[in-house]
Amino acid sequence: MTTKAAIRAEGERLLAAFVQAGAVPVETDLLQPAETLLDLYGEDIRARAYVTDDPVRGEMMLRPDFTVPVVQAHMAHGADPARYAYLGEVFRKQDRKSGRASEYLQAGYEVFDRNAPEVADAEVFALFRDLLAGLNLRPVTGDIGILMAAVRGLETSDRRKAALLRHVWRPAKFKSLLDRFAGRAPVPGGRLRLLDRLKAGSPLQLIEEAGTFVGLRSPEEIVARADGLVADAEAPPIKAMEAALLYDLLSLESPAAHALAHLRGITPMLPAIGPAVDRFAARLDALAAKGVDVATLAFEASHGRTALEYYDGFVFSFLADGMPPVASGGRYDALTAVLGAGAFIPAVGGVIRPELVARLKGAKP
Amino acid sequence: MIRIGVPSKGRLMQDTFDWFGARGLTMRRTGNDREYAGAVEGIEGVGLVLLSAGEIPRELAAGRIHLGVTGSDLVGEHLGLDADEVQELKRLGFGHADLILAVPSVWIDVETVDDLDAAAAGFRAAHGHRLRIATKYHRLVRDFLQAQGVADYQLVDSQGATEGTVKNGTAEAIADITSSGETLRANHLRILSDGLIHSSEAVLWASRVADWTPEDRAVMARLAGMLGVPVPG
């Protein structure tokens, strides 16, 4: 059994190393306004986070992660560029049978820097690698930015692209949409019935016939979507070759250097991923410069898609068998725009779980 | 003494009494009408506890009652459909009610849960807040919508008159128990074609947490024989 004191000491060691690397230590509140997190992550977060009620401040959540409050603090009054480090508890409800801790320490490091994002990616990854050296962890990397670029580059309607991008972090839903848009899955019965009904008249007329109008969603919104559905039904499926490339990309898992060669190979057929592949190449160069062997580094194009965070570029984890990820992180440029009220800064960071590090160290002879 | 929790009033209580009565166990309320006390005849060693149907899941999970009759919706909502604390002994064939998802009838562009998801994206963009779904079944509804990949919605609590929330402007859609569709229609709402979240029914549950003494187990074996249910394991 790893004692709390040993875990705390491990956390302090990591925090000191982050500060040594140039980060400013920051503290955040344990109680976070629920509304911000709910708007960001949706109701699903309620199943994962502890929600409590305050008569004055409204619904509050026990801090489920540090990224949001750290980004908020930075966007409000941060230096530019900036590096932050933190150490503290996070709280997550766990499945009955998972046996996972619902309260644990996280030590984190976040970089807000407009220059050379790929170098910042490599900086975070290499720092984590060094701090976790000797624990025999398996690093896995990914890049959600390539997938998003591929979707944006599809020869299909903006409506379909937006639907796919909105569900990038929900792989099952993403796949069912892609199957449908690519003509690989039949149009569901419910949609066929709906299209049939929409043929019976103009949308406004149909709304009129449907009865008393109730609710905040306006007739204009309803008409716009109804028109969109009819247009979508007439739109051709995503071309077989484009779809095949996207399916291929979703399942791409190989050593990073090999993945780059593969992506270079398909870029002529999917030119929109070119800039994202260039960034991937620049990152591998930056990683190699930090002594990472990119010929063996694991790369999975779908890695990080189910994570809580809104990662939209580089993602990484350090894994050990039989426990949650020991460390994980990634790039979340879009999140800074969402929380920055118009302002934006590229950002990358990650967290380490001191408890797991201490446990792995304790297990060694 | 095996303590069995039974809904303390209404149709559910009467149906439960009838179900046990048909199997040789007479349950009845004792004392005056306002006093929630009861008795079981036909077997020794079983005590009746009259409770609000909504409290029976909690009492089972706490082990304060050994057996309980209540809707599968209430156990799913309070304990989760995969709860370890309780074991389903028998579906009793009454108390049927469906938890459904309904939207305004005038939403001619919304037929399925997928449509609701797409409408939610558009709604949020147009109104600046997530599409509100009124319900008192937060957990069942959230688990259902999460499994279907629905985003950009928010659950707002409604403990009663839920069908009226859309008309009153406090929600865009609802998730509620409906035995008939009449109240929905009267409130200008329509059920999504794949909007059945949970099909509820009265169930006889056993607590895995309660203290089952050897005497209790002996009584339970006899009781199980009378009721035609498995012995809890």
Image (cartoon, coloured by chain):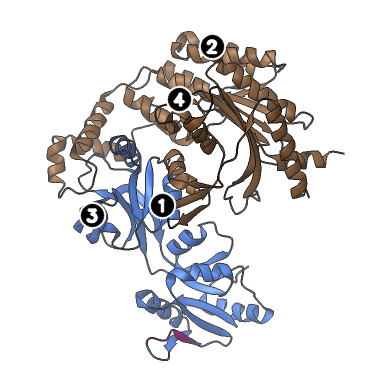
**Chain identity of mark 3:** B
Chain B shade in the render: blue
Tell me the brown chain.
A
**Foreground: disc 3 or disc 2:** 3
| Front: mark 4 or 3 | 4
Mark whose residue sits in front, 3 or 1 = 3
Label 3 amino acid?
A: Asn
Extreme residue in the top direction: A268
Q: Is residue A181 visible?
A: no
Amino acid type for the residue under numbered disc 4: Phe
Q: Which residue is mark 1?
A: B141
Chain containing the residue with disc 1: B
Say which element carries label 1: helix
Q: CA distance from mark 4 to mark 3?
A: 39 Å
Q: Which mark is residue A278?
A: 2
Which residue is more in the foreground, B62 or A234?
B62
User: Which of the 4 image quadrants contains residue A209?
Assistant: top left
Q: Nearer the viewer, mark 1 or mark 4?
A: 4
* Residue appearing at x 68%, y 30% in the figure: A18
